[in-house]
Image (cartoon, rainbow, N blue to C red):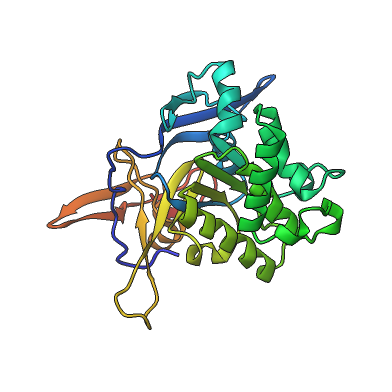
Amino acid sequence: MTQPGTPIAAPQPAETPYIHCEDLFKIYKSDELEVVALRGLDLRVERGEMMAIVGASGSGKSTLLNILAGLDQPSAGRVMVGERNLLTVTDEDLVDYRRRDVGFVWQQTGRNLIPYLTAEENVSVPMALDGRSRRFATERARGLLDQVGLAEKRKRRPTELSGGEQQRVAIAVALANDPPLLLADEPTGELDSATADEVFEVMRRLNHDIGVTVVIVTHDREITRRVDRVVAMRDGRTSTEIVRRAQFRRDEGDALDEYAVVDRSGRLQIPREYMDELGIGRRARVTMQDDHVAVRAEADADQDASDGRWRRR
């Protein structure tokens, strides 16, 4: 939760972010109904970063992840992953992108693995589809299973593995073609906390060892101590960021700095608890106060004509 005095700061720009979303919209249409899942979202993810996206159901986080995975296309805006613009990419390039540039881990283990294949065979499948030789695929599959701590269980089928082990195999499958980006949608949603720690530790180790960029969507409240940065979404936009900052003293542990996100149009989302506490409704007064900006509720109170109650605007 944002604390009083939390600094309001725009994310520091980088020269070449690996993921760059700018004014991103996604609108789903069905008959006469329109649902706006993303509303002008801005997001930057650096190459080699391990970060998480959190938010309530309906905030748009899974929609964003599906767009980054090439499983859905945005309605408007800009979304760059590496050198690819996912808004204008051709169908042929999109297939190539999904096969070689991005790996995806689902929450449901049944969506990640083929049940009648062994762990080694599951990891080999993406390489076979990419035209790799059987020898190459087998050797790399064994190496990846060793990296996720399952070398001794490479001949077991998914039903012979625990939930955490299945997710570790799924991570190996996602990295089979050596993609620079790993996406995970609630990868520990069906696991207990101890097993979740093991899965997150595997992703952290791979992020460190091979430099893969990792983006995780999760409801896990402990995610802030497992990743470099946490971006919270609300109403289809990024609202706050929590950034891990290393401390110099070993006994202090890392510090967590929380910021309200300012997009390139100057928009920011005031935390809901602040709005409720200050009585901010439809309008607010914004004034410059030396070295900071002050946001206050409208001073005059009006009677709400619709229900007869007095409230601040």
As drawn, the residue found furthest toward the bottom would be 251
Q: How many marks?
A: 0
As drawn, the residue found furthest toward the front would be 135
On the image, which quarter does residue 176 sit in? top right
User: Between 172 and 187, which is closer to the camera in this rendering?
Assistant: 172
User: Between 229 and 32, which is closer to the camera in this rendering?
Assistant: 229
Q: Is residue 69 above or below residue 231?
A: above
Say whether residue 137 is visible. yes
Residue at (48%, 55%) from the top-left corner?
A: 209
Residue at (85%, 45%) from the top-left corner?
A: 115
Rendered location of residue 243, percent (x, y): 38, 59
Rendered location of residue 111, percent (x, y): 76, 42
Rendered location of residue 161, percent (x, y): 81, 59
Q: Is residue 102 above or below residue 195?
A: above
Q: Is residue 81 left or right of residue 264?
A: right
On the image, which quarter does residue 133 sit in? top right
On the image, which quarter does residue 247 sit in? bottom left
From the image, which quarter does the N terminus lie in? bottom left
